[in-house]
Amino acid sequence: MLQGEIDNIQLSWVKLGTQQAVTLLNAGCNDLGGTLMEETISRMAGADHGTRQDPETLRAIAEAAGRPAAERSTDYTTIAPAGIRYRLPA
């Protein structure tokens, strides 16, 4: 019904966890959201998953769903040549 009207749908791995994130990426969501430094609101409300995820983990979630990973700006413009500009030091 809304195909073509809503371009991007963000899921909340914070509330649902990484396994459900893969499921929702397979179901049509195209925005995994971002990393968190410290999340307390969802945890205080009873969520089990609101902990920090590094960029590599989020890329692995996208890969598990067979989806490309790219860093994007708030207007969904891809950032950097390969869409990835940030990596944590090894």
Image (cartoon, rainbow, N blue to C red):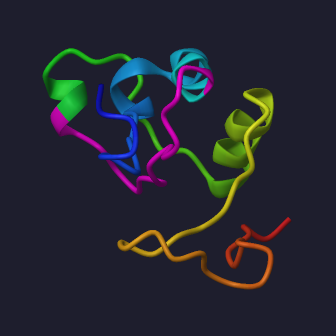
Quarter where residue 15 is shown:
top left
Q: At 73% across and 40% down in the image, what residue appears? A: 67
Report the number of discs.
0
Q: Main secondary structure of the magenta part?
A: loop
Taking the image as shown, residue 29 lies to the left or right of residue 89, namely left
Image quadrant in which you'd find residue 58: top right
35 part of magenta stretch: yes
The extreme right residue here reads 90
Is 51 placed left or right of 18 in the picture?
left
Give percent across and percent down for residue 75.
37, 73
Residue 22 in the image: above or below residue 56: above
x, y percent for residue 79:
61, 80
- Point out residue 56 in the picture as x, y percentages from the top left corner: 73, 51
From which residue to which does the magenta span run? 26-41
Whether 89 is drawn above or below 56: the answer is: below
Residue 28 among magenta residues: yes
Q: Residue at x 78, y 71 (%)?
A: 89
Residue 67 versus residue 64 in the image, above or below: below
Q: Quadrant of the C terminus?
A: bottom right
Q: As displayed, is residue 71 above or below residue 34?
A: below
Which residue: 16% across, 37% down? 41
Question: In this view, which residue lies farthest toward the bottom?
Answer: 80
Q: Toward the viewer: 27 or 20?
A: 27
